[in-house]
Amino acid sequence: MKKLLTRHETYVFLAIVVFSIIITSINPSFFTIENLFDLLKSYSLMGTFAIGMLFVLISGGIDISFTATATITGYVVAVLLLKYGEGLNILSVFLIAGGIGILLGLFNAVIIYFFKIPSIITTIATLNIYYGILTVVSKGKWLYGFPTWFGDFNNIRVFTLYTADGNPYGLSIITVIWFALILIGWFILRYTILGRSIYAMGGNPASAQRAGFNLLGLNLFVYSFMGLMAGIGSVIQALLVQTVAPNSLVGKEMDVIAAVVLGGASLTGGTGTMLGTILGVTLIAIMGNGLTLMHVSSLWYKVIIGFVILVSVGVSAYRSKRSTRKHIITEVN
Amino acid sequence: MAEPFLALRKVSKHYAGVTALDKVDFDIQKGEIHCLAGENGSGKSTIIKIISETVKADPGSVIEIKGHAVHGNKAIDAINKGIQVIYQDPSLFPNLTVAENIALGGFVASHRKLINWKELRRGAEKAMARIDVRLPLDAIVREISIADQQLVAICRALTRDVELLIMDEPTASLTKKEVDSLLAVVTDMKSKGIATMFVSHKLNEILQIADRVSVIRDGKMVGTYPGSELNDEKLTILMTGKKVEYQRFVAGKNGNNPILECQWLSRRGEYKDINFKLFPGEILGITGLLGSGRTELALSLFGISQPDTGEILFNGKPVNIRSIQDAMRLGIAYVPEDRLTQGLVNNQSVGKNIIVTTLDSLVNRFKLLDQGKVTDSIQRWIKDLTIKIPSVESPVQTLSGGNQQRVVLAKWIATQPRVLILDGPTIGIDVAAKFDIHKIIRELAEKGIAIILISEEIPEVYNNCNRVLVMHKGCILGEYDTRQATQEDIQNHVNGAY
Ligand SMILES: Nc1ncnc2c1ncn2[C@@H]1O[C@H](COP(=O)(O)OP(=O)(O)OP(=O)(O)O)[C@@H](O)[C@H]1O
Ligand SMILES: [Mg+2]
């Protein structure tokens, strides 16, 4: 019990409960299974990006460029779909997007590692490069009219229920993909040497070097994993809206970083959990959705998210300050 | 002589503007205990970093392990050759648990892919059993004490197949009991054929365990001597090139009004019924073993924790010191025991680190920083504390450990406080520099500053203080006037209690 109270996740969970109660009391349609499935589907995109971001933050870095990466992979996939639509299937689409995402991530890692440029600066630069090149090439054109199988995949449900007036709803295949990625990410972080090494490097890179960890390898993995999640995310986005617009993702990086930080990952590296990240994404999803259901202008959304992040980061900074203070005092015992 | 396990031939290392090592020859036999002694900044840690292949020696240097030249430049190469290092700073992962810190490295080096948490915990327990310590396996390393962190680093080194264990000042923050069990481990490993290279500023430890002692001065090897042929005095002369003599100091106290007085001060589980008076211009010593409550008491005087009962009088008036800011406003400064992790901005220059606490006094009449004053102030402290640096612009992290400590001292002494609390001010500082630091402390006292000197080393408090308080289990056991009592009296009292 005491342990539960010291965990960041507990507080995020409590915040989710409080928000849910408030929203439901104003608009009961919030707390329905239908809305839940709907939320799970539409926030799979942010959730997928957040998995990649969690890895990068734990390693002690940050990646701003993933939205540009996703824009490129999404665009390539869209062009291919329009050209060779019937010859492709969902797996090959994911593989192509993921592969390109990995390459772009590797490029980030190489620059960060070999030129020792802070990751935030590197990825702001590559964001502009990737996005700039794509804008030039695509001339900002929207792509749509994908093959029917691509639209059908989006409608697959693992099981289906019906509303009172006969509308079908259920657990979408897209949510299942997101859940699978969560499981993989959780397993890597918890049960592989690789995952633990990422925590170690984020905690103290100098110690990691001295202990014989392969820092280059770890960096390559972390940023290419982020690239992979960006690639997969871009396909999810294309599935969800059946359109690829070059300007639809760039600008959303802060929402994702916010969700992960809200979930307890620190910008200084070394901390963060998969559970926390899921809760962080959930909290942001509930607030976004709840504000709509409560008929609050969407313009307020950013303001409120900003406050929630301030409170969250402030509280955890305060708690860690208290614990080091206690630590100074107990030093000699 | 048999072929050595490790041999360095003409090893040099230059950093921009500094010769850290100059054509050093050095060898370690299988299973021997080899101590390395030298002043702060003489190049001891640099030798270690070269052996562990975390730093590359200059071209032309030859390093041989078991007769084979090595060219590797990754730490993992040295680890795989059986070399384990415990660094001056513990080099742990503050965000991970004790168990992971101890055992994770072994998993990485053996190219395993998956973690077996049970096995990891067992490995950690086994390593702890070897030096007979018990630490909570699931505690986060950031939250345990520095001494415990040091133990974690030692345990970690023991999880692997070691042929050479290198320890860079491992005992600086350990209790006597822990030091004893560590030295016992070293002797035990020797019987198993494991060599140890040991760096320490505590000459008595060196003399106690060393088979051979190598002495290094200003990056040059002075020589290697059998441990049995050395004593304190000889070793000091070899290290410093001169004879250092201790002189007693008795400060006059100014006036009859105490600047600081504690009355029946208690804090549960930390210290109890503390009564003492501190006069301007005197040096009051507090000694006692680690855990005697001496540091807790100091923390309360500095506003980091509050006493439960009792009263603190400052200049005769009761005060409530609720925060560090309160303490600083009264003119109380505290130099903490654990200076390597507290109180330095590592990637900032030495100069900036020294002046951060005194920025207010270095402004001109437009309230802007007066660069002339800033430079003067920095130069003065670097000279007074003989801080050895290539330039004031060097980032603190490139200094040797002992020199980093001097920077922190400078930073606090520069605030010109009215009461200065020094907690173990010479831990990890070489003999000659200790002497310099004591001189500075005495000069401060002569200027009328009241000083509390907390130290485990009896000679240090005895030679510098007018009065010495002996603490044990949170209580003051006795007060000695150093003009009457002898060092042995105090030593016996401390040991008796222990
Ligand atoms: N990265 C670096 N850049 C520049 N100079 C350095 C660097 N690392 C060490 N030095 C310099 O090399 C010299 C030797 O340092 P070293 O750390 O080996 O000393 P040490 O003998 O271990 O001292 P101590 O007893 O204080 O730990 C010092 O003058 C130090 O300032
Ligand atoms: Mg050193």
Image (cartoon, coloured by chain):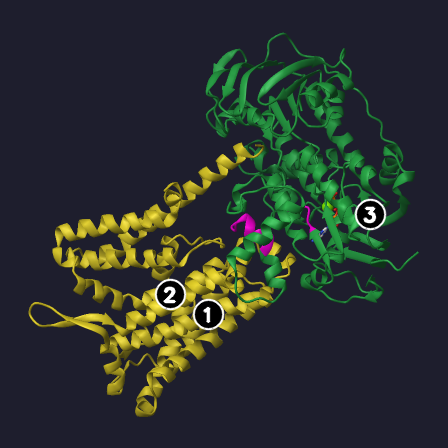
Chain colours: A yellow, B green
User: Residue B335 appears at what percent x and percent y?
Assistant: 61, 31
Instruction: Give residue A225's mark.
Output: 1
- Name the residue that disc number 2 marks: A182
Q: For this view, does A97 lie left or right of residue A211? A: left
Between B31 and B81, the residue placed more toward the observer is B31
Q: How many marks?
A: 3
- Residue interval drawn in magenta: B86-103
Residue A186 shows in the view: yes
Q: Is residue B164 above or below residue A136?
A: above
Q: Is residue A181 above or below residue B354?
A: below
Indicate if the residue with disc 1 has its beta carbon within 8 Å of ligand 1: no
Between A289 and B252, the residue placed more toward the observer is A289
**Image quadrant in which the N terminus of chain A is located:** top left
**Mark 1 touching mark 3, by CB under 8 A?**
no
Chain of the residue displaying label 1: A
Q: Is residue B460 above or below residue B142?
A: above
- Name which of mark 1 and mark 2 comes first in the sequence: 2
Residue A251 shows in the view: no
Chain of the residue displaying label 2: A
* Residue found 90% across the figure and 39% down from its top: B228
Instruction: Give residue B34's mark.
Output: 3
